[in-house]
Amino acid sequence: MNNDDIKGIRELLSSSQRTAIIPHRSPDGDAMGSTLALYHFLLKMGHQPFVMAPNEFPDFLAWLPGSEKVLVYEKNKEAGAAKLRDAQIIFTLDFNALHRTGEMEQVLSTLTAPFIMIDHHQAPDNYARFMYSDTAFGSTCEMLYGFMKALSPETTIDKTIASCIYTGIVTDSGSFRFPSTTSATHRIVADLIE
């Protein structure tokens, strides 16, 4: 993400905002880890974030800090749509095409609030005002770590945020076995452990 994008996002977040954070349908560890890490980070910055998953996430991720606050669109589509329409900013994490949200796409495609995409998959759609898209990264959580450091260096990545980011990195790297794992990945993980 370039400096102009960071500056633009800082301006959007210069006052408290109702912020939607959305993972893809059937979210995995990287999707849930990144959305919950961003949720806790934005709370620390004084915003009003919420995570809305298109459908239920796996039980084995229910230990993640804040998972009990995740809204599930499929449980109450009418209320979910109203909440999304009320959002002032929308982050989409770990996907780069709105159809990856299933039925939620019908609502998301009508919204006028600015979208911010953070994702590491190929061939992104052009729906976001700000796109941080880079296939060189093995996980969205790894990208999110750098995004947070660039966006608000004074906001500490605490144990709660670190646990969420670490989860996404471990799951999407195959416990550091996949070729996308780099020395930078290990440096981030070392910082999270510290």
Image (cartoon, helix red, strand yellow):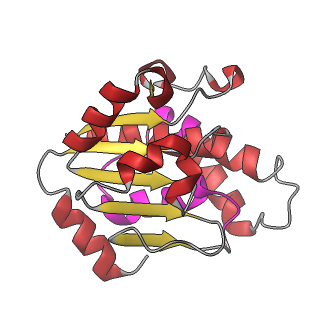
Residue in view at x 49 percent, y 27 percent: 74
- Position of 192 compared to 82: left or right? right
Residue in view at x 78 percent, y 63 percent: 181
Residue in view at x 47 percent, y 70 percent: 132
Dividing the picture into quarters, in which one does residue 182 lie?
bottom right
- Position of 20 compared to 158: left or right? left
Viewer-proximal residue among 110 and 53? 110
Chief SS of the magenta region: helix
Viewer-proximal residue among 142 and 59? 59
The quadrant the C terminus occupies is top right
Q: Position of residue 86 (x, y in %)?
A: 20, 40
Q: Is residue 148 magenta?
A: yes
Residue 165 in view here: no
Q: Position of residue 127 (x, y in %)?
A: 40, 68
**The furthest residue to the left:** 15
Reply above or below: 67 against 5.
above
Q: Position of residue 125 (x, y in %)?
A: 51, 72
Residue in view at x 56 percent, y 72 percent: 124
Dividing the picture into quarters, in which one does residue 62 lie?
top right
Q: Position of residue 17 (x, y in %)?
A: 17, 46
Dividing the picture into quarters, in which one does residue 20 lie?
top left
Viewer-proximal residue among 86 and 5? 86
**The furthest residue to the right:** 177
The quadrant the N terminus occupies is bottom left
Q: Is residue 151 magenta?
A: yes
Reply above or below: 130 against 73.
below
Q: Which residues are magenta?
A: 137-165
Q: How many marks?
A: 0
- Position of 162 compared to 126: left or right? right
Reply above or below: 6 against 14.
below
Residue 97 in view here: yes
Reply above or below: 46 against 177.
above
